[in-house]
Image (spheres, rainbow, N blue to C red):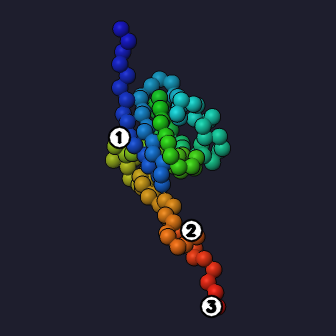
Amino acid sequence: MSEKKTYTEKIGRRKTSTCRVRLTPATKSSFTVNGKDVKDYFKTVALMKVVNDAMTLVAPDQKYEVTVMVNGGGIHSQAEAVRHGLARYFAELNEDSKTKLKKEGYLKRDPRSKERRKFGLKKARKAPQWSKR
């Protein structure tokens, strides 16, 4: 009989990106995003830093099996959504890490998104050129 793995799932959001982060305590660390390795999905060093910020701040020595399903938005927005989901998990774990994460701003949802285009305008706020005559 195979033993059943217990995981904790948290949701992270940023702009139009949404992600489901599943963390399972493990003996060996692994991190997959949409079925790919995290290094293959978030290719740049800056994006990898964004994704790992919450983990390195609170639990640098702990090992987890992390599985992420992320969709919507751009690649940077997705990275910040993953960070938000991880931060929510670690904030629930203990109060000390919650204050650290809150101070860094990792627990904020950041709802900023693109404003919709209005009728009669070229973009959200840009009006067509006006001429007096």
Q: In which quarter of the image is the N terminus?
A: top left
Locate residue 34 relative to residue 129 in the image: left or right.
left
Q: Distance between the residues labelled 3 and 1?
A: 64 Å
- Please report whichever mark, 1 or 2, sits nearer to the chain's N-terminal start: 1
Q: Which residue is drawn at 49% across and 70% down?
A: 119
Q: Position of residue 90 (x, y in %)?
A: 40, 42
Relative to 53, residue 8 above or below:
above
Amino acid tagged 3: Lys
Q: Residue at x 35, y 40 (%)?
A: 93
Q: What element carries label 3?
A: loop
Numbered circle sitting on residue 132: 3
Q: How crowded is mark 3: few (under 14 residues within 10 Å), some or many (20 or more)?
A: few
Q: How far apart are marks 1 and 2 (CA)?
A: 44 Å
Query: Disc 1 marks which residue?
Result: 93
Q: How far apart are marks 2 and 3 (CA)?
A: 22 Å
Locate residue 108: give its quadrant: bottom left
